[in-house]
Amino acid sequence: MQLDGLVVALAVSAGACLGGGWWTWRCLVRARYLLDTPTSKIRSAAQGYVELYGVLQEQASLLAPLTNTPCLWWRFKIEEYCASDKRKTWRVLESGSSEIPLLLADGTGECWLHPLGAEIRPATRQVWQGDRRHPLRVDQGGLLKWLSSGKRYRYSEERLHTGEPLYAIGEFCTRGGGQQGLDLAAAQGAVIREWKGDYEQLLKRFDADGNRQLDEREWQRVRLAAQLEAEDRHRQISLQPQCHELRKPTEGQPFILSSHGEDQLARRFYWQALLGAVACLLGALAVAMLLRNALA
């Protein structure tokens, strides 16, 4: 084997080994997160990373973009079939998903699920094909219709509906109701950063000597005022009705909303880990064989 071909083959094999190993580790970690996190009730859930089971509640209904079906959440994809002498594939033309929060109830309380950044696995998924760019739009006549004639399109749409059971794991927090603790230093810093965004107004309030600079005494006044403002804002939030929310964790843990339970999800992660391990092993064997042949 020529040197260039050997280098390419080694790079591909090593990539398969490393990529398979990383994928195996990732899937195993995700499975352990699901199995090791105990299920919580919304009313008594601790602040932080939690696992919830519940039923999706009716709220402002959406219409799925490809079927006009009423739902609470949707995700769609439109692909075009592309064929040439060397390659046949589906090319993505359009895709998207809704980002409106979902309301989950478990009999003890309700929690708003923010789908942004979540891995969502719904039970309802439709896939079909057609000869129009969009299944609900009427093609216009003329040159545009003639150019698009004979093309094949594939549509896929996933949805969540009212009354469906849902498994959710992510970062849980409670706002209002006097439940939210106050990190005074962080809250004070946030207020000061906000005020610095309008520096002219900051000078107008605290520059006592009018030299357009804040000395140490004036900064002490700024910090004291920011502390009082942070405490007042926290007091106002505490007076609001209690609201539970589930969002994407900041520490990199899995954030999953699924129509399937944790056991089924964990099994899927274990199978994916097995496939990654096979790819890692085959890549390692290929590297060993290539090096042996090169040194022989």
Image (spheres, rainbow, N blue to C red):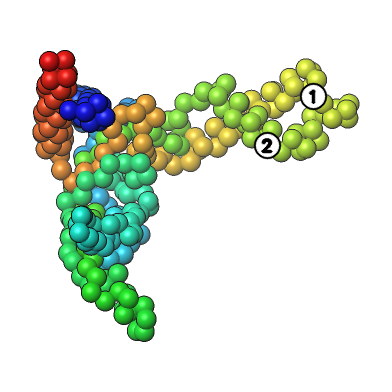
Q: Is residue 149 left or right of residue 271?
A: right
- Percent x, y for residue 94? 33, 59
Tell me: residue 47, above or below residue 90: above
Tell me: residue 20, above or below residue 130: above
Q: Quadrant of the C terminus?
A: top left
Q: As shown in the figure, which amino acid type bears the numbered disc 1?
A: Leu
Q: Which mark is residue 197?
A: 2
Q: Which mark is residue 249?
A: none
Q: Is residue 183 left or right of residue 219?
A: left
Most foreground residue, 173 or 266? 266
- Percent x, y for residue 109? 29, 41
User: Residue placed farthest to the bottom in the image?
Assistant: 142
Residue at (68, 37) in percent of width and height? 197
| Residue at numbered disc 1 | 214
Residue at (34, 55) in percent of width and height? 96
Tell me the SS state at disc 2: loop
- Percent x, y for residue 160? 24, 54
User: Residue placed farthest to the top in the image?
Assistant: 295
Tell me the SS state at disc 1: loop
Q: As shown in the figure, which amino acid type bears the numbered disc 2?
A: Gly
- Percent x, y for residue 62? 33, 62
Q: Residues within 10 Å of mark 2 (few under 14, many from 20)?
A: few
Most foreground residue, 130 or 50? 130
Residue at (78, 17) in percent of width and height? 216
Q: CA distance from mark 1 to mark 2?
A: 15 Å
N-terminal of the two: label 1 or label 2? 2
Q: Is residue 4 left or right of residue 211?
A: left
Q: Is residue 82 left or right of residue 270?
A: right
Q: Is residue 110 among what the camera can see?
A: yes
Q: Residues within 10 Å of mark 1 (few under 14, many from 20)?
A: some
Q: Quadrant of residue 222?
A: top right
